[in-house]
Image (tube, rainbow, N blue to C red):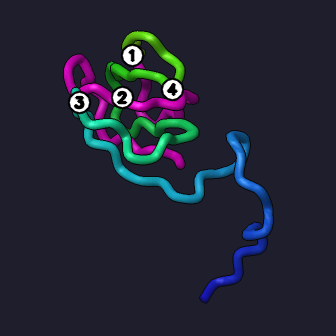
Amino acid sequence: MPIDQFRTFSDGLDTGSRAPFAITPHDTNEIPVTPKALYIGTGGSLVVFGVDASADVTFVNVPNGFVLDVRALFVRATGTTASNIVALA
């Protein structure tokens, strides 16, 4: 087993992702674990509903390889053209 020199450090919004996972945009399925941010592999538009939001918001022209600092509950399929999205949890 590899040595994790940071295993005793606390996790926070300013620390690296410990459990990244792929996201498939969906209009009604909530993201199973609220991420710290979203990595956008292939750019485009991204429609999200944030943790404390009251409505969806659309990020347009998100570039390839961009880390979007948003804690999202949903990444909607409708209106999202970006792909290869990874939740940084």
Image quadrant where one finds the N terminus = bottom right
Residue 29 % position (x, y): 26, 36
Give, as a three-letter code, the residue at label 1.
Asn
Please report whichever mark, 3 or 1, sits nearer to the chain's N-terminal start. 3
Tell me if mark 3 has few (under 14), some (14-19) or many (20+) residues whose alpha carbon lies within 10 angstroms of its own. few
Q: CA distance from mark 1 to mark 2?
A: 7 Å
Q: Are marks 1 and 2 in contact (CB under 8 Å)?
A: yes
Q: Which residue is mark 2?
A: 43
Q: Which mark, residue 51?
A: 4
Confirm whether the magenta stretch covers residue 64: yes
Q: CA distance from mark 3 to mark 2?
A: 22 Å
Please report whichever mark, 4 or 1, sits nearer to the chain's N-terminal start. 4
Question: From which residue to which does the magenta span run?
Answer: 62-89
For residue 4, which quarter of the picture? bottom right
Q: Secondary structure at mark 3?
A: loop
Q: Which residue is mark 3?
A: 28
Instruction: Left or right? Give the position of 86 relative to 44.
Output: right
Q: Which residue is mark 1?
A: 61
